[in-house]
Image (tube, helix red, strand yellow):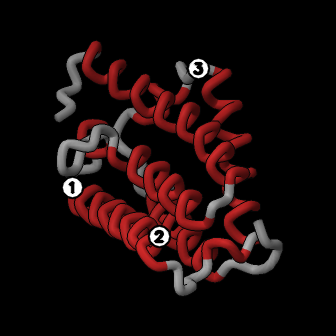
Amino acid sequence: MHFGFSYVGLIFLLMLFIPNGFWAKNLPKDYEKYVQNENKILLLLERIGEVLVTTILVIFSDFNIRDAGWWLAWLIGAFVLMILYEVFWVRYFRSEKRMRDFYSSILGIPVAGATLPVMAVMMLAIYGGNILLLVADVILGIGHIGIHLGHRRECKASSVVVK
C-alpha cells in the first residue's frame, strides 16, 4: 500500500456522488416510509463503510493506472461496473421514480444501485492490492446492500411491485 493521491479514486467518488446528489432531489415515491424501518446495525455499518471507502479511495495511490499486466483487467472491470451504475441512474431518472424503479436490477444484478458500486470498489481494491479498501468495502456492502434488500423486501410485502 502506498500513501498518495489517487485520481482514479477521485473519479470513482465523483461517479458515486454526482448521481446521488441528483437523487436527493428525486427520491422515489414513499421512500421516507421505508427509511424509518431501516436496521440500525446495517445503517451503522453503511456509514462506517462510506467514511472508510471514501477516505481510502483518495489517500492511497495504489488505484492509479499503472503498467500492471493482466491485473489491469480488474481496473477495467471496475470501470465497466461503474458505467453500469451510471446507466442505472439514467434509467432511474427517466422513470416514474417509484420504489420499484429504484430497486430494479441490471443484467440480473439485484438492487443494482447498491450492488454495482460495491462490486466495482471490490474490483478496484483487488487491482490496487489494497486490503484496507477491501475490508472497508465489505463493511459498506453488508450495510448498504443489506439496507436496500430490506427496503426491496418491504416493497414486495406491501405489494409495491419490484422487478
153 to the left or right of 18? left
Residue that carries the numbered disc 2 in the rendered image: 71
Residue 85 point in image, percent of width and height: 36, 60
Nearer-the-camera pick, 135 or 23: 135
Q: Which amino acid type corresponds to the residue marked 3 in the rendered image? A: Asn
Q: Position of residue 36 (x, y in %)?
A: 55, 23
SS state under label 2? helix
What residue sits right under mark 1 in the picture? 95
Q: Comparing marks 2 and 3, which lies closer to the viewer? A: 2
Q: Nearer the viewer, mark 1 or mark 2?
A: 2
Which amino acid does the dot numbered 1 rest on?
Ser
Q: CA distance from mark 1 to mark 3?
A: 28 Å
Q: Residue at x 46, y 79 (%)?
A: 69
User: Which residue is drawn at the image coordinates 18% and 50% (left, top)?
Assistant: 107
> How dense is the environment of label 1, judged by Cα within 10 Å: few (below 14), some, or many (20 and up)?
few
Q: Secondary structure at mark 1?
A: loop
- Amino acid type at mark 2: Trp
The numbered mark, 2 or 3, whose residue comes first in the sequence reads 3
Q: CA distance from mark 2 to mark 3?
A: 37 Å
- Where 47 sits versus 122, above or below? above
Distance Cα–Cα, label 1 vs label 2: 37 Å
Give the camera-side residue of 98 and 102.
102
Which residue carries the number 3 mark?
39
Choose the circle earlier in sequence order: 1 or 2: 2
Q: Position of residue 30 (x, y in %)?
A: 38, 33
